[in-house]
Amino acid sequence: MCFKWLKKNSLPSLQSCGTIDINLASSILLDKLEEMGCKAEIYLPDESMKVYRKDDVIKFLSLDETDKIKFVAEIQDCDDFAAELFGKFAGLVWTQTHALNCFISDDEKLYFIEPQTDKISENLDDWQGIAIRFLLGR
């Protein structure tokens, strides 16, 4: 398990269980964008990208309180929720209508995370948008 507590009685920290090189990460992301019919800008800031076990992410999200933050339009809305998880571990995704997060699993799959509900999926729901505009990896 790549999951640990930073200090006793503190919030959990999700540790990556490895990395993949930028070429493999790009390939995974580009394949997903092609499957979705998108031509998004992708930015991978490092020569490797962290990968996570899906089960560890699920456990982390169950303990993390990002989804408990009160939604306030234009003040604490989708981009703020997504920025919160981006600061902890996840990549950032913008569609034409919504901001959310993503990660690549240790079995080389791209997953989306809805930071307001903790839902993890391989595809976007219609209300989240149909076209990814920008993806920032971690």
Image: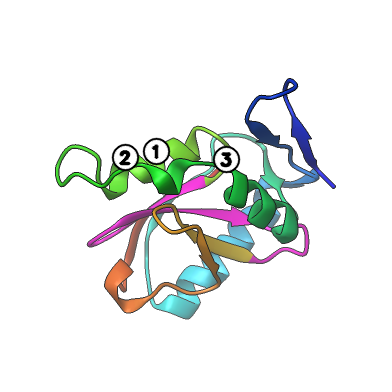
Task: Tell me if residue 98 comes above or below residue 6 in the rendering.
Answer: below
Residue 11 sits in quarter: top right
Residue in view at x 46 percent, y 69 percent: 33
Name the residue rendered at 48%, 74% in the picture. 123
Q: Is residue 108 visible?
A: yes
Q: Secondary structure at mark 2?
A: helix
Marked residue nearer the N-terminal end (3 or 1): 1
List x then y, in percent, for residue 31: 56, 71
Instruction: Choose mark 3 or mark 1, whichever is in front.
Output: 1
Instruction: State the residue in front, 109 or 21.
Output: 109
Q: Which mark is residue 83?
A: 1
CB under 8 Å between callouts 1 and 2? Answer: yes
* Residue type highlighted by circle 2: Asp
In three-dimensional space, the C-alpha distance between marks 1 and 2, rounded to whole angstroms, equals 5 Å
Q: In front here: 104 or 120?
A: 120
Q: Is residue 38 above or below residue 6?
A: below
Location of residue 47 in the rendering, given as x and y in whole percent from the top left corner? 66, 37
Q: Which residue is tagged 2?
A: 80
- Element type at mark 1: helix
Q: Tag 3's secondary structure?
A: loop
- Residue 4 location in percent, x, y? 77, 34
Q: What residue type is disc 1 on? A: Ala
Residue 138 is tagged as: 3
Q: Residue at x 37, y 65 (%)?
A: 39
The quarter of the rendered structure image containing the C terminus is top right
User: Is residue 136 in view?
Assistant: no
Q: Please indicate whether residue 72 sits to the left or right of residue 43 in the image.
A: left
